[in-house]
Amino acid sequence: MFRDQNAERSHNMKIDIRSFAMVVEFKYLGTTLTYQNSIQKEIKRRLKSGNACYHSVQSLLSSSLLPKNLKIKIYRTIILPFVLCGCETWAHIEGKRMLRVFENRVLRRIFGPKRDEVTGEWRKLHNEDLNDLYCSPNSAQVIK
């Protein structure tokens, strides 16, 4: 293996008789790799895929006919695998935060609003409430 003299200008690598061009990013086994080894685009792409999956089953998750444990199974078996595929490489803290925000949004849809005991008004569930209701560890902790 050696680098071609002209490779410095064209960013090519020559191995035997084959020449390989340098690219900014490419997809390998379903994961987007960049020349700077940045995973931001990959995390955003996975969350976008999870959003698309979430919107396809949104009517099920907001239905009052399905029990909450079935909605959680739908989340774990249909939505979460789209998001977590390849997440073992996500050492980035921002990616884990984005994953937690996504998960909280889906869980809020599953568990619905809560009536405040003091004022009697309906409100969104806080993160602590979601942690209490969702007995599993959050996805960001699972991928550590």
Image (cartoon, rainbow, N blue to C red):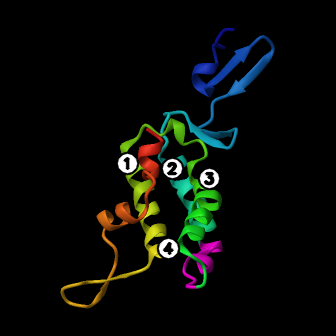
Q: Earlier in the sequence, mark 2 or mark 1?
A: 2
Asked whether the residues under the numbered discs 1 and 4 touch, taking CB atoms below 8 Å apart as contact, a structural biologist would say no
SS state under label 1: helix
Marks 2 and 1 sit apart, C-alpha to C-alpha, by 9 Å
Marks 4 and 3 sit apart, C-alpha to C-alpha, by 17 Å
Q: Which mark is residue 81?
A: 3
Vertical relation: 13 (above or below) 120: above
Marks 3 and 2 sit apart, C-alpha to C-alpha, by 13 Å
Residue shown at the point (71%, 25%) measured from the top left: 20
In the image, is residue 58 part of the stretch drawn in magenta? yes
Marks 1 and 4 sit apart, C-alpha to C-alpha, by 25 Å
For label 2, count other residues whose C-alpha is less than 10 Å away and answer few (under 14), some (14-19) or many (20+).
many
Q: Quadrant of residue 134?
A: bottom left
Judge from the rendering whether residue 84 lies leftward or rightward of residue 17; answer left or right: left
Q: Earlier in the sequence, mark 2 or mark 4?
A: 2
Q: Which mark is residue 94?
A: 1
Vertical relation: 82 (above or below) 55: above
Mark 1 residue type: Glu
Mark 3 residue type: Pro
Vertical relation: 116 (above or below) 73: below
SS state under label 2: helix
Residue bearing the label numbered 4:
110
Judge from the rendering whether residue 69 lies leftward or rightward of residue 118; answer left or right: right
Residue bearing the label numbered 2:
43
Nearest the viewer among 47 and 63 is 63
Residue shown at the point (34%, 78%) measured from the top left: 124
In the image, is residue 40 part of the stretch drawn in magenta? no
- Nearest to viewer (mark 4 / mark 3): 4
Residue shown at the point (81%, 14%) measured from the top left: 17
Vertical relation: 51 (above or below) 36: below
